[in-house]
Amino acid sequence: MSKSLPYSVKDVHYDNAKFRHRSFFKVITQTLFTSDMKRECVSYSTGKFLGLFMIFGLACLILTHASKTPSATDGLSKGLETNEEHKVVTDVGVRFKKLLRRAPRLPPRLSGNEKVSSGIFTGKPNEHDEEKWKARQRNVKEAFIHAWSGYKKSAMGYDELLPLSMQGFDGLGGLGATVVDSLDTAMIMGLEEVVSEAGSWIESNLLERISQKGDVNLFETTIRVLGGLLSAYHLSGGDQDMNLANTGPKPTIYLEIAKNLADRLLSAFTSSPTPIPYSDVLLKNSSAHPAHNLLSSTSEVSTLQLEFNYLSAISGDPKYKTEGMKVFAHFKTLPKVEGLVPIYISPHSGEFIGQEIRLGSRGDSYYEYLIKVRLQLRSIQDGNFTYLYDMYEEAMRGVRHLLVQKTVPNELVFVGELPGGSKGSFSPKMDHLVCFLPGTLALGATKGITKEKAMKDNLLTIEDFENLKLAEDLAKTCFEMYSVTSTGLAPEIAYFHTKDFYEDGLGGGNQSSEYVNDIIIKFNDRHNLLRPETVESLFVLYRITQDPKYREWGWQIFQSFEKYTKVDSGGYTSLNDVTTLPPQRRDKMETFFLGETLKYLYLLFGDSSVIPLDKFVFNTEAHPFPIKDAIYLEGGSFMMKGTM
Ligand code: DMJ
């Protein structure tokens, strides 16, 4: 294995922004007025404006005193200093370097009036900003209406819309997946007409489809269809015994269908000889079978539990939770590589198969659900589920140690793969799917509250700070995977230029991107499926850090979707090649474009009090479930203590 770059507390002072060359005078003055250092200076200065004339004296003062003022933008060093268990001595050399460092270069493609500061943000946007974001949020709502009307016109009741040929396609077992995946987005956006259309279709057709349809994938059906029904149940007032939706069926309809579906899906667990479920279910006769290669994907078997746990909570029947959680209890016993796990597991032996480790396809949401299920069950008194958090923390240490490297020449941080396990070589390859990780890391660090509040209440450990730092760096890389292409849209997979790897002539096509030599896009990986992971992470990071740059990045991505994927006759389409103009289109609108991508963009541009991250947990398909204040009693039954 090539030597991986340590990404740990030793590494925390570097800044991932790219710098311009400027004069020493500008460096000093702009540092004082535009960087994090400004806030530190304020607490020392008896005459901060005189500081311009006494710059070296003031600089010396700054450099020889440790800061006592909390700074929202320099939380890492502050947090480390205040953590009783892990006191870190202030590094004077690093502080001197910070003073000399040049102001971060602004993200590319921002227009003049959209420029954001390099990190000074108050969390209180002015009125003009508020109006701007409301208008942008309306743009996203219009995009959703355009996507839905294309689907309704040409594909209503099919799983997916083929927007170019204007027809429907059943790629997910024929349960009308786009209808169910879209419903809670329409509820959140207040689109009553769409709620009525989708809700009525579900009420009239879905039970029949479930009882008559054939093969479905356990994971896809759980995250999209079961997940969509459950969040619709909550958002329409189900677990408050109310009907909050002005239109569509009453909430109990969603719950009844969800139970019927889940009862059939449970056969994947009960037919398997181990706690690892089979990958496929024949819905009509409630039987299950393994995939052709007899294996299950690690991420698939460990990305069912939020849904099954919530269904147990609202139905009062513990069987869903009991089966789902057996998977995690089993994973706890299996050997791992610094918390990281291979991407295949056998439902027959219960053992991992092969060595391949990655946080992209087949690995990704295992890590996501470790922390999210722990957050979902955090109010349970018996503490039986703390092992999930331990597994998550160990895995993130493994990611930082074994998988994180930086690019040449511009030091973008990325998460690579271990195709041969711990003894194989490192591959500088990252699926777009890995871009869920910044959001998950940020959520895991603050547990859904803002970084500012978490720091004020002294809640963050060194590991939390390390994870937050990695989250922010990785989010930037994910954003640059968009910026580096001609279309402003990311490829499905990127490779990264490192000291051990480079391939010439495979750039993204945007020559004005400063990362054009850092990011390599191979021919077969140039497609874009309208995936959500980057905007999902931008949404979570915006909520947690309150840094408006994440909104601006999301806006740029949204504009590119509008420009290159919108189909005039209705809907949005995938692309075959994001690096050439005009991009060749691929005839498919994935359900997650409505279920996830547009929902996260809408929430990113909206009020942060809507679906707060400390009170809701989003399943991997962006369906939000409330975190119940529940006490689980012995045997798995529980009492509610009210809803949040
Ligand atoms: C979604 O179905 C889910 O987010 C899943 O976890 C990963 N892949 C797609 C979106 O890209």
Image (spheres, helix red, strand yellow):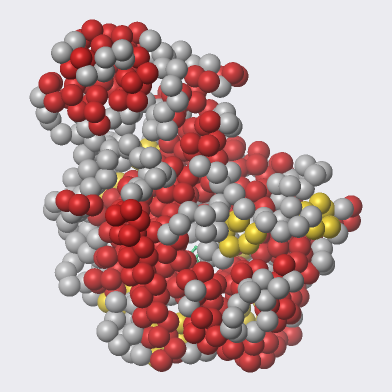
Q: Does residue 636 appear left or right of residue 405 in this picture?
A: right
Instruction: Determine the residue located farthest toward the left in the rendered image.
Output: 23
Q: Is residue 553 visible?
A: no
Q: Nearer the viewer, residue 104 or 522?
A: 104
Q: Is residue 64 visible?
A: yes
- Rendered location of residue 498, percent (x, y): 29, 39
Q: Nearer the viewer, residue 359 or 243?
A: 243
Tell me where residue 327 sits by quadrant: bottom right
- Rendered location of residue 574, percent (x, y): 34, 73
Q: Residue at x 71, y 51 (%)?
A: 377
The quadrant of the rendering that contains the N terminus is top left
The quadrant of the rendering that contains the C terminus is bottom right
Tell me where residue 245 sits by quadrant: bottom right
Tell me where residue 598 sits by quadrant: bottom left
| In the depicted structure, whether residue 335 falls above or below residue 8 | below
- Rendered location of residue 419, percent (x, y): 46, 49
| In the depicted structure, whether residue 133 falls above or below residue 1 | below
- Rendered location of residue 600, percent (x, y): 44, 62
Q: Residue at x 39, y 33 (%)?
A: 73
Instruction: Determine the residue located farthest toward the right in the rendered image.
Output: 634
Q: Residue at x 52, y 31 (%)?
A: 455
